[in-house]
């Protein structure tokens, strides 16, 4: 489609959904301001992305109806945000993070376990492959950002993405409370507990909160391991594109008979290119600014996803999603702890 025609279609879509879009932007601004105020008051802040998502869900579920923004946010704004977030990843941390053999082992155990259990248990409980994959990505990598980054390539609809995000956030809260407590009960030292927090807590702010509760050494190690997990997005996003292409071809299990790059959305190579540029070529000031723009663009997307969540969808798959996520979370906590105790015990 010519650029002029695409622009006309986009503007037409914006006009047709102007009120839901206005609501999403307003909620995004409110979430950003609320998070800033909580931080300034030295209060625990869940993160502006969580606030935006929850605010949208409260409105949609409270009203009993959705406020759909069409494809403006998830089809246009989200891919742009994904590419910009790529500039914020630093692949060098995988070799320079100081996480050691135990941290690397826990990192690998977490990634493999989260995906294997999420897909296996999710499919057994009736979830679709996109739902199970997105749930695994959220647990294995970095919560909201990972779910949002893989969903478009998988073809996961906005309302379903909202349900996956809700489950990931609830489980992330559970892990941030449990890990420091269980670390004390099990008698882990600060380094072991910090590695465990970084390997098992879902979102970056939550992992840092768990590390801080453990102590200064725990915070440093939790940060290193967690940021290393975030870097796995450069693998997970292209993998989601390949899985999504297979699903669209109607045969997700069969070997690819065509190039795996066929049907890959444009933002996937864009994300990988942005990650490489941000890691090795661009100055940190530029990458930080681009990453911040991506995070700001993500806020109205998440608010819009929350506004599109349906009560019927929550009732139909919410239980299966929650149970799958809980099983996967317990499994990744247990396997990552076993790896840490084996390699650093």
Image (spheres, rainbow, N blue to C red):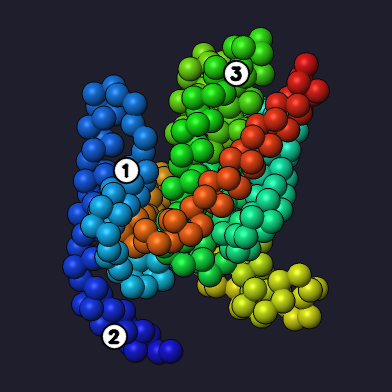
Disc assigned to residue 182: 3
Q: Secondary structure at mark 1?
A: helix
**Residue ID at (40%, 62%):** 312
Q: Give the numbered dot on residue 316.
A: none
**Where on the picture, by quarter, is residue 294?**
bottom left
The N terminus appears in which quarter of the rendering?
bottom left
Q: Nearer the viewer, mark 2 or mark 3?
A: 3
**In the image, residue 21 above or below residue 208:** below
Name the residue rendered at 53%, 70% in the picture: 155
Q: Nearer the viewer, residue 218 or 169?
A: 169
The label nearer to you, 3 versus 1, is 3
Q: CA distance from mark 2 to mark 1?
A: 32 Å
Q: Which residue is mark 2?
A: 8
Q: Nearer the viewer, residue 192 or 62?
A: 62
Secondary structure found at label 2: helix
Image spot of residue 185 (x, y percent) = 62, 12
């Amino acid at each position: 489609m010519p650029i002029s025609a695409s622009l006309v279609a986009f503007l037409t879509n914006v006009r047709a959904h102007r009120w839901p879009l206005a609501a999403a932007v307003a909620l995004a601004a409110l979430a950003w301001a609320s998070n800033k105020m909580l931080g300034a008051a030295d209060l625990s802040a869940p993160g502006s992305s969580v606030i935006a998502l929850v605010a949208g869900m409260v409105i949609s579920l409270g009203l009993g109806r959705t406020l759909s923004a069409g494809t403006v946010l998830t089809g246009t704004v989200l891919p742009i945000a994904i590419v910009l977030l790529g500039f914020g990843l630093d692949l060098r941390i995988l070799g320079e993070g100081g996480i050691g053999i135990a941290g690397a082992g826990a990192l690998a155990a977490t990634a493999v376990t989260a995906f294997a259990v999420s897909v296996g248990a999710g499919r057994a409980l009736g979830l679709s492959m996109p739902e199970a994959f997105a749930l695994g990505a959220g647990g294995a990598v970095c919560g909201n950002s990972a779910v949002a980054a893989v969903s478009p390539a998988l073809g996961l609809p906005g309302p379903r993405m909202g349900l996956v995000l809700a489950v990931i956030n609830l489980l992330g809260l559970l892990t941030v409370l449990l890990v420091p407590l269980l670390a004390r009960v099990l008698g882990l030292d600060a380094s072991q507990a910090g590695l465990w927090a970084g390997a098992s807590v879902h979102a970056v702010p939550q992992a840092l909160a768990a590390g801080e509760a453990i102590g200064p050494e725990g915070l440093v190690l939790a940060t290193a391991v967690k940021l290393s997990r975030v870097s796995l997005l450069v693998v997970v996003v292209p993998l989601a594109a390949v899985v999504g292409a297979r699903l669209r071809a109607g045969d997700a299990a069969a070997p690819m008979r065509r190039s795996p790059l066929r049907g890959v959305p444009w933002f996937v190579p864009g994300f990988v290119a942005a990650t490489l540029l941000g890691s090795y070529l661009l100055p940190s000031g530029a990458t930080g600014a681009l990453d911040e723009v991506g995070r700001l663009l993500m806020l109205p997307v998440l608010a819009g996803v929350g506004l599109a969540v349906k009560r019927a969808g929550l009732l139909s798959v919410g239980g299966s999603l929650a149970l799958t996520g809980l099983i996967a979370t317990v499994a990744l906590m247990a396997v990552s702890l076993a790896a840490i105790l084996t390699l650093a015990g």
